[in-house]
Amino acid sequence: MAAFLDALFLQAGYNAALVAIGAALLGFAAGTAGTFLFLRKRALVSDAVAHATLPGVGIAFLVMVAIGGEGRSLAGLLLGSALSAFAGLWLVEWIARATRLSEDAAIGAVLSVFFGLGVVLLTVIQTLDRGRQAGLEDFLLGSTAGMLLQDAMIIAGGGAAVVAVIWALRRPMTLVAFDPGYAAATGIDTRRIDLAMMGLVMAVTVIGLKLVGLILIVALLIIPSVTARFWTDRVERVLWTAGLLGAAAGYVGAALSASAPDLPTGPIIVLIAAGLFALSLLFAPARGVLAAILSRRRFQARVHRRQGLLALTRAEPIHDPLTIRILRREGLIRPDGVPTDEGRALAAKIARDERRWDIARQVHQDTSLTGRYDGLTPIEEVFAPDEIADFDARLGPPQPVGG
Amino acid sequence: MTAETLTLAATDGTATAAGLDPSSPLAVRGLTVSYGEKPALFSVDATFPAGAMSAIVGPNGAGKSTFLKAALGLIPAVSGEVRIFGAPLSAARDRIAYVPQRASIDWDFPTTVIDVVLMGRYRKLGLFRRVSRSERAAALEALDRVGMEAFADRQIGQLSGGQQQRVFLARALAQEAELYLLDEPFAGVDAATEKAIIDVLKSLKAQGKSVIAVHHDLSTVADYFDHVFFVNVRAMGEGPVDRAFTPGALAQTYGGRLAATHLDQLTLAGG
């Protein structure tokens, strides 16, 4: 525990601190790049890209050994993984374009074939004398152990560069994700924006290989953005919230891993991200599970309130205890069941809106909208003034409300 | 040589001689678009008048939307020439605003009404400039013109179909363009929205802007539009509504697909 706290507050040595900062930057880059992947509905492509890195790692190692190097240079291994990730991505696009196979089939094929090839290469490398100490298996699940200062710099610098490019391209990428046809009409080259998006995802994958590992980097790309989506309805806020969530998961995960070197880093980071996701799923306002339960309860109360008020307009007695309790609580009826002035006024308004809603349902054969009618949401919140005027025109002259 | 300036000889060998009218907001010549081997549009010529409201009319599958998309460069043309105010498309982007069909939008997308309208300002903002207060004011004014100012902070999925259409029109207004291209703006909207949209379009015309809309409701062509362009894979005729919107032109464009009883209810030129 003490070791974890030391790492968390950057007290576990210069190297560990730099790794934690690098992980935070990587998480921020992954969360933001993943947001556009998620909004463009291309999350699975990143899985293919990630798995396609593995043969590149193996081949880069073999090449570096063959030309007399040590074979462990992170920069060299990342370059190899980037090249094979690009080959995998290109293959997915080509299969989807040139054959009748759909993109998901192409992703499945490329993902498994590249990963299989990578595992074979890694197994061969393990049998080599020098391969045994190379630590290439760390690229599967990630590790902070044995990370050099220089490695941490690559991760931090790469993450920062990705974030800078995303900031610059956030508007065209938003437009292309939301409405590609309109984006193209305003002169945006949608194909190039999509390429830039995939390029950023590839960069995050490659930079994150050593720390998070190729199997789980997809989780770090996708989980932060779907988590952020629970909290806001605006793209820019989803984007930066996802970045912060990714950064938090990366930072805490790297710190934990530094204090317990036997644990692979990737799974820890992903579990922290998943924990944040679970919290959001439960507690987010408006979109969370708890909010859904509460709004069901509120809905129940509204239905009873409306029925009660409609009964008042018809001067019918109310027997349902829940309805009486709700109307009493809001001071709409007196203890003896007689409506107060306020209750009478509200009942009259509800009766009029009821007739407007009848018209609205005829005009809009639109269940998603008229389905939101619960008798309490003022009609002014759902329809524009001119639409309501149109309903009133169809209603005919106002009728006197009987007391 | 870019795609939009590519010119092939017209099939009848006559039309390519003269230049396209530079005062026209949208003029095309020999436009051919093909998804497979069967062309969706074949050697279409059209010249739309400036400062007027024009309808593109034709049966389902006649290539009306394809015509707009090809004119905007959204789908590649096999051949043909497109001029916007006499200029190639790439030089005229700032002068065009486009309202696409609503069908392809993900309504759960995390964006609010005001954010959608601000997208109309992105081109002017470029990559780095901040969304200033005046940008926001321009977006709100565009929303006000379509009667949706009170809905600025709603997530777009919470709107009705007609309201969504108004928001997309507001986004086009925010572009402050000179040519407005609309793809079936009245499809699936309520009567109040149709009126709101047509009022906005008429006010655009009053400001001297040009409006071109794909339109499917023949009964309102004469009320709403000044100019009509008939298309059914090939250009079937064009001209001012009071002269060109005739039973003969409709019969030619729609073939046998238009019931005679339907024709009786239309306001037709010379009928």
Image (cartoon, rainbow, N blue to C red):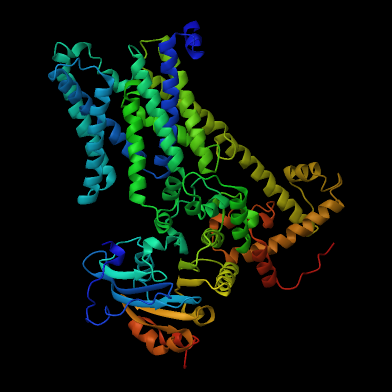
Q: Is residue A89 left or right of residue A375?
A: left
Which residue appears at 32% of the width and 25% of the height? A209
The front one of A167 and B55 is: A167
* Residue found at x 65% / y 61%: A357
- Circle count: 0
Tell me: A378 left or right of A328: left
Image quadrant where residue B70 sits:
bottom left
Residue A143 in sight in this render: no
Task: Judge whether A125 appears above or below A397 on screen.
Answer: above
* Residue located at (39% from left, 30% from top): A219
Q: Nearer the viewer, residue A130 or B16?
A: B16
Identity of the residue furthest to the bottom in this view = B270
Q: Quadrant of residue A356?
A: bottom right
Quadrant for the N terminus of chain B, please.
bottom left
- Along the viewing direction, whichever of A286 and A254 lies nearer the viewer: A254
Q: Residue B169 appears at what percent x and percent y? A: 53, 62
User: In the picture provided, is A47 more to the left or to the right than A303?
Assistant: left
On the image, the x and y values in percent for residue B40 come to 29, 70
Residue A87 x %, y %: 22, 37
Residue A267: quarter of image = top left
Can residue A218 be seen in the rendering of this structure? yes
User: Residue A68: percent from the left, percent from the top?
Assistant: 14, 16
Say if B192 sits above or below B103 in the image. Answer: below
Q: Nearer the viewer, residue B112 or B125?
A: B125
